[in-house]
Amino acid sequence: MFVVINENVMEEDLVVWADIIGTVAGILVLSSFIPQIIKAYKTKKMFDVSAHLMILIASGMFLWVIYGFIRSDPVIIGSNVTGFALNITLLIMKIRYDKIQKAVP
């Protein structure tokens, strides 16, 4: 049960908690890219990773960035700019390593 002394204080607390939850969610989602980037860098192989998936995710994240700017939400902007960059990194690695694999007889 909440004891509400001032309705504005409770609303501000909810905004803080929403930002904390959004930040933690962003960190968890973004950290999922790191193992794939490390594995791709070490093995120089990404033939089993779908380029279509990466393009769709990057497109969605780009739209989330626009949405974040419209809403002036730094959590949405920050997590999706970072996710977009990580996804583009994976896509570049895929294109590069797939070319190398095709060139090797």
Image (cartoon, rainbow, N blue to C red):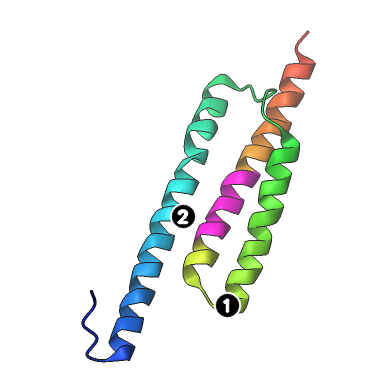
Left/right of residue 34 with respect to residue 7 in the rendered view: right
Q: Is residue 15 left or right of residue 105?
A: left
Q: Is residue 40 magenta?
A: no
Closest to the observer, 7 or 73 = 7
- What range of the chain is rendered magenta? 79-88
Identify the residue shown where x is 56% and y is 20%.
43
| Dot 2 or dot 1, earlier in sequence | 2
Residue 101 position in % (x across, y down)? 73, 18
* Residue 3 percent across, percent down from the top left: 21, 82
> Is disc 2 surrounded by few (<14), some (14 to 19) or many (20+) residues within 10 Å?
some
Residue under label 1, please give it.
71
Q: Secondary structure at mark 2?
A: helix
**Horizontal arrangement in the rendering, residue 57 relative to residue 28 (left or right):** right
Q: Helix, strand, or loop for circle 1?
A: helix
Q: Is residue 85 above or below residue 103?
A: below
Compared across the picture, whether 35 is left or right of 61 comes to: left
The residue under label 2 is 26
Residue 80 numbered tag: none
Give the percent coordinates (x, y) of residue 53. Answer: 70, 39
x 73%, y 25%: residue:
98
